[in-house]
Amino acid sequence: MMSFSSPDHRLDSEYFNSPGGFAWWYTDLVNESGDGAVIIWSWGLPFLPGYANAERSGKAELPSSRPSISVAIYSKGKPAFYLLQEFTAQDASWDQDGQWQFGRSTFTTKVVDGVRTLHGSLDLDIPGTNERLQGEYRLTAPARKELGTESRDPTHDWSPLSGPAQASLQATIGDEEVRIDGRGYFDRNGGTRALHRLGIKDWLWGRVPLADRERIYYVLWGESGQIESHGLDILEDGSTITYPLEATVHRAKWSYTGVSYPTGLSLSSGGKPWLEVKHHHTVDEGPFYLRWIVSAETEDQRAKGIGEFVVPDNIDQDLMRPLVRMRVHDLKGPNSMWLPLFAGPAKGRVKRLVRSLVS
């Protein structure tokens, strides 16, 4: 269902030009106050309206035709800002040496003397207003070293890129200033086949910043009943320890979009407790995706992290597609009339919607 590959392997044109495939880079930061941010830049993001449906209909699009950026900001465990913006193919570029451009926004990463840095310069229009999100995201971390036992399967290729990281986001949203500092994380995903064709029923992923390491879990349940689990510790020197995991999910709840999801997760390795995760603060909820600020415990530490739950078969289904379109700002249009209600700052949503409807 998924391969865990070397950080030295870069996603290349194979992912960019595979019909129905995907390539995305993910970074986040979180602190103990529940403040945080998640930024994803991508080509062929499976969650974009119409992308998965085109593949199901035998008319798969190239990832290169669907570039996008997603920015989510959280305050005290609650959503404060959300924007998923789609660009034209001509307005986005990808340099395999670690540079990306989407309109006025850029991302750059490099490794020098074992230290990975990531710099994101954000400049994004906020729909329904004349305002913009403008800001700087910075991450510094030990670069993850090659383990030597990684494998590479281009149908689904995942690799964390950073060890324990310090990250910051400094931004203005209209006339409001935002500053968040915390522990950061950086990884990337690529696939040459559509996400819903990988045999995955659903998955839970999360990362927790422990005192001297980054602890990451990835548990996938297959459509045929198989379970695939990855447990990682990335240490301060960039080295990686892998763990075989046994996963026990906590009782299920239903989201308002009809997704049954676990309220937590108990992970053990070799019969010993490895991580206890509780999904306390839901910060993103949709028909195929949930994200949380998680509360996690080991035998001697507690920390807040980021977790997600994905149901690939639910992506881009006819019934829910209009709801998803309400949250996606397509710069080439047309867009849902409800977009200003769901995109931008959490404050002032209704006012933005009314203003856009009467203008």
Image (spheres, helix red, strand yellow):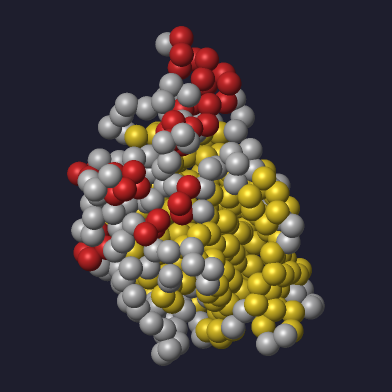
Q: From this view, report whether residue 58 is shown above or below residue 164.
A: above
Q: From this view, report whether residue 150 is shown above or below residue 155.
A: below
Q: Who's the residue at 50% across and 77% down the image?
A: 142
Q: Which residue extends farthest right?
A: 300
Quadrant of the image containing the C terminus: top left
Quarter of the rendering containing residue 131 = top left
Q: Position of residue 102 (x, y in %)?
A: 31, 47
Direction from residue 338 to residue 166 in the image, left or right: right
Q: Which residue extends farthest front?
A: 224
Q: Who's the residue at 47% across and 72% down the image?
A: 160
Q: From this view, report whether residue 234 is shown above or below residue 325.
A: below
In the foreground, 346 or 288? 288
Quadrant of the image containing the N terminus: bottom left
Residue 177, visible in the rendered structure = no
Residue 71, visible in the rendered structure = yes
Q: Who's the residue at 22% across and 46% down the image?
A: 59
Q: Who's the residue at 58% across and 21% down the image?
A: 350
In the foreground, 102 or 295? 295
Q: Which residue extends farthest top?
A: 358
Q: Position of residue 163 (x, y in %)?
A: 53, 75
Direction from residue 280 to residue 189 in the image, left or right: left
Q: Position of residue 106 (x, y in %)?
A: 34, 52
All told, the count of numbered labels is 0
Q: Which residue extends farthest bottom?
A: 148
In the foreground, 68 or 141? 68
Quarter of the rendering containing residue 8 = bottom left
